[in-house]
Amino acid sequence: MRVLSADLWEPAPGRVVTWDVTPGVGRRPAAAAPTWNQRNHLLGAGSGEPSVWITAAFDVDGPIDPGALEAAFRDLVADHPGLRVEAVRRPAPEQVGLVRHDPDGLVWRRHDGPVTRTVAETREHLATELTRRCAPFGYPAFLPAAISRPGRSTIVLGMDHLHTDAWSTTVVIDELAARYAERTGGRSDTGGTGRAAGPGRAAGLPAVAAAEIIADPVSADRAVLASGADRAPAGPPSGDTAGPPPVGADDPRLATWHGFLRDRGWALPTFPLPLGVPDGERVPQRTVVRPLADAATADAVAARARAAGASTSAAVLVTLAGAVADLGGPAVLETLLPVHTRDDAAARGAVGWHTTTVPLRIDSGAGDTPAGVRPWAVPAGPAVRPAVPDTALAATGKALRAARELAAVPLEQVVTSLPQPLRFPRTDIFQVSYLDYRRLPGHAAAAGRRAHHVSAATRADDLQVWVSRTEDGIAVRARMPRTPTAADTVDAVLDRWSDLLTALPPTPLPPTDRRPADEPPEPART
């Protein structure tokens, strides 16, 4: 899976085909309850925040068969209730709400659009259509589309964040590919899991706990953690519950949330190095996509992390903290972490917004490498302190496991129980996301399908980071303000981060069977 923003997307030109989907006349939709993150996403959109869409895109052989593709889209929407919700405005105090449409009442109309001639023209046309069609109010907040070409075509489903998260994007690609191949006699797809049904087929996925930090903040802005940071707890695939039940007022997990915010003066985390954006301003975003470690290095990092009683995600986080510290930042990096709430087989195969957010302090171990403690990596140069020590890696693994326990606390309860209002130093929130795509639907076929996750490009005033692990290794997408200062700062952080991950000690640690409960074994290789 390639994770990009629209400004870096390079769709090849061809005939652009789209579909309009409208509710049938006389059909009354059923009432549905928005989750906490959906409600606040809608409040942000209602206050003028730009459209926040996520697009699943992948290639198939030959020109598009419009009838087969429409049937595949129809089946996908019918099987996933999350794709049939419509956001509606309500009178105060509710302000926003959801209804859900009957799939049998939806009317589909195909439009054969322009034949584009260049990558730039294709990107601009699709981005414009996605921004217009994937706005959250009205139905649908998604755009079924394709780019048809004689030899190899691209299938596209853009979705407002109301309908989806990063994990869901992999489900969409795998199911659409299987459904389309079924309708075209199998001639269109390079392979996959063959899952042609919706959540009911989720039992075919690997039996993996959804604990390896898996989410895509896309636009973690104040509208969403003014009530719950970028991600609020989502309900089961039906979408008809608003998250976990409240915890007791004396629950230590609620106290941990309060303590994190109290220590920050009730302010949400911001990236601690200069980004060159004046207070109160946002500027067009800059996106950087680059590798952090190749496949062999990623495997070595995973083994080293397990030896320290931690996970690969903990290694990624502690080395980021080390990079920030090396460039003049604090020794302890504070951030918010999106985590999935997909705790059962049905949720693993669902399309929806199934994530929450937890706070995390990451102690880089800067200046704390006692004699006899092996460093995480060899220093990049004589002027740089010894890299992240094993003690910091182990501590980050422990902190990460503790942070995930906070996912059981409803964000609404966190916010409403604070003794003082949250403060928002910036519009965006500093967040770090990690997603191991090897554990998700269709990972084996993703490269052959040229699977892409493409997010809208908007405006920014803080740094947000998405880390992806695939068969190729570990890569990062970073979203930041488009300023010279931010470019210099973030590029330097990414360089140092990569150094800390890749400059491993010359001799490995002894093998160990210790493995933390939050990370499953590496998948079998054939």
Image: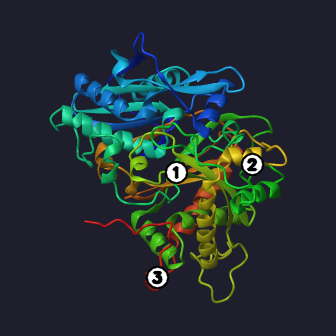
Q: Nearer the viewer, mark 1 or mark 2?
A: 1
Q: Position of residue 47 (x, y in %)?
A: 69, 25
Instruction: Name which residue lies at 75% across and 63% down.
Output: 330
Query: Callout 1: helix, strand or loop?
Result: loop
Does the residue at mark 3 contact the one at mark 2 (Cβ under 8 Å)?
no
Examine the rendered structure and indicate whether residue 170 appears above or below residue 111: below
Residue 114 appearing in the image: no
Q: Position of residue 38 (x, y in %)?
A: 58, 35
Disc 1 marks a residue whose amino acid type is: Thr
Whole-Å distance between the Cαs marked 1 and 2? 22 Å
Disc 3 marks a residue whose amino acid type is: Pro
* Count of number-bearing discs: 3
Instruction: Name which residue lies at 30% across and 53% down.
Output: 204
Disc 2 marks a residue whose amino acid type is: Leu
Examine the rendered structure and indicate whether residue 507 appears above or below residue 234: below
The residue where tag 3 is placed is 508
Q: Position of residue 322 (x, y in %)?
A: 65, 66
Residue furthest to the left in view is: 185
Q: Where residue 238 is drawn, which disc sits there?
A: none
Camera-nearest residue between 496 and 388: 388
Residue 347 appearing in the image: yes
Instruction: Name which residue lies at 67% across and 24% down.
Output: 95
Sooner in the amino-acid sequence: mark 1 or mark 3: 1
- The answer to whether 371 appears left or right of 26 in the picture is right
Examine the rendered structure and indicate whether residue 110 appears above or below residue 194: above
The residue where tag 1 is placed is 341
The residue where tag 2 is placed is 268
Whole-Å distance between the Cαs marked 1 and 3? 35 Å
Query: Callout 3: helix, strand or loop?
Result: loop
